Amino acid sequence: MEKLIQILQLLGSYRIPAVIFSVEVFVAVCLLLAGLSLGGGYHYRNFRANRGGKRARQAKKIFFERDREPELLIRRKDRYPEFQTESFARVFGVTKEQMQADLTCFLDQVEEDFGKKLWKSYQRWDGKSEFETEIQLKDSERWYRIRVLRSRDEQYDWFRFADITQYRTQITQTEEKLEKAEEVSQSKTTFLSNMSHEIRTPMNGIIGMLTLAHGKLNGHQAEPYIERAEQLSQYLLSVINDILDMSRIEAGKIELEKKAFSLQAMAEQLRAMFQKNIEAKGVAFSVELQDFDLDWVIGDELRLSQVLVNFLSNASKFTSSGEIRVVFRQLLKENGRVSLMMRVHDTGTGMDASFVSRIFRPFEQENSHIARQYGGSGLGMAITDQIVRLMGGEIVIDSMKGRGSDFTVYLTLPIAENQNVDKQALEEERAVESFDYQGMHILMAEDNEVNAEIAVSILEMDGAKVDTVVDGQQAVEQFESCPPGTYDFILMDIQMPVMDGRTASRAIRAMNRPDAKTIPIFALSADAFVEDQRLSAESGMNGHFSKPIDFEKMKKEIGKILIKGKRVGA
């Protein structure tokens, strides 16, 4: 009050006009609010309350005479159309009299399925839940969304029709674009699958022939040339794999496996792969596991190994003195998941900060001198980054020119339930190391003559007897014609004429004979991706080996399955 008196004193002779002006403003605002309440909310409240009488009917009429969208008011007790807007009559082509004669006549202008669905749903509606549906007009592109409201006294239902034609058109256009994008993506996938097959098949022949030739030389003066050719073939294969991997990543077609694997076994595998060559250069090499109280996790072991192998390959390439150290560290364990840190540290040439910022771009290398001296496709780091992202992790790089580099992966993986390796598993592992094909009878389906010749030669060198056929149909007939127990296992190419390998595998599994369900069947395929392995497993195959075939790795995998099968059978 004192402040108000002070303000009036400051106004002096102007205080009386100021007070009068303030009162006028206040009165004007009150009148405006009262007008809005009577003009807009009055009609809606009267509709909702629906107290009856002439005044209520006039309010409803004023309310529905607004011609923004089609609207309809129905009296529930006798399904009588009390009011309809002019736009309702225009859209549905019905008069008030026609509606009074037949309330559902407006549905004649609606596509039949939508009209039936609308009226059945309305008749079942309890008036409490939200009622909303969409309809399309007959022989038209126009769409409407219908919302029905019930009055508070439950005597009236109010139908509101909103034009959503533009919205539906946008949805249709988006769906068409999505369909086209999926077709393009599928075309890319098909192309990549075909390219993988066409490239890997001859590569399998080249590497296989070099392997056979190398085995026959026994110290011949040409042996170094064969060894060099084998190295170049493996390098070419790695470039091909990088290109195919990058293409599939860009097409969104990379799938990750979710299998239990041992971190300790992975660390030992990295040690076996790199220790000899790195230490031969006079560089110290170590692999450490720190702060672990578990070993088995669930994830894609092959892809994670690919990441670390890429880091180690670069470290080995650019480090001529000092050390290369690999560290696995357990960070946090909670809710059945474990956070891991995996770091590759080297004291090599290091990198400029400007290159570190773009190192994950495809085909990126620090400079042309590096490319000429060390080679490489420039795809390895781009693929590595995408793989880690797919796993939900991240890569952190710390590098200084002339001081070396640290490549660190931070990743969280589910913890495998079984953390114990039993004695039987260790015995099986030792048995696999000494496994060979001596005395085994193998059925092989392979339509490529060169690949068949290579596989037969290598298998026979290891003591096996091999029967060959050229398509899946012949494989099925050959297996069916022989007594149970004739073959120890089957090697099945996937892409073959007449009948493909997966169809043949399903046909064999469906036979009514004792060994049809148990004989191991292995895919030999130029299709090398996770989804291809899954398709092979779904067709009843026990394993999937990608071309070019690593015959030593294949022997271990087959040995593992055969030894385990014998133990189960015993």
Image (spheres, helix red, strand yellow):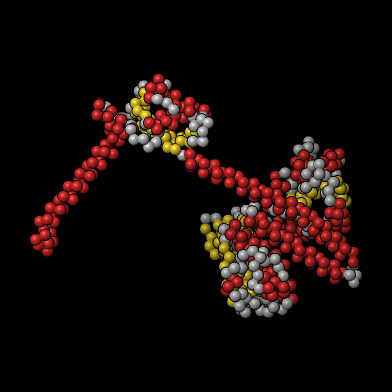
Q: Residue at x 85, y 69 (%)?
A: 225
For residue 569, above or below residue 413: above
Q: Quadrant of the N terminus?
A: bottom left
Q: Residue 25 placed where, x, y %?
A: 18, 50
The residue closer to the viewer here, 71 or 269, is 71
Number of labels in the image equals: 0
> Position of 365 compared to 130: left or right?
right
Quarter of the image for residue 361 reads bottom right
Q: Residue at x 62, y 76 (%)?
A: 350
For residue 446, above or below residue 45: below
Quarter of the image for residue 547 reads bottom right
For residue 216, above or below residue 473: below
Quarter of the image for residue 311 reads bottom right
Q: Residue 330 placed where, x, y %?
A: 57, 64
Extreme residue in the top direction: 101
Q: Residue 374 placed where, x, y %?
A: 71, 72
The residue closer to the viewer here, 197 or 74, is 74
Q: Residue at x 58, y 46 (%)?
A: 177
Q: Residue at x 71, y 68 (%)?
A: 376
Q: Is residue 566 visible?
A: no
Q: Is residue 223 visible?
A: yes
> Position of 337 compared to 517: left or right?
left
Q: Residue 533 placed where, x, y %?
A: 70, 50
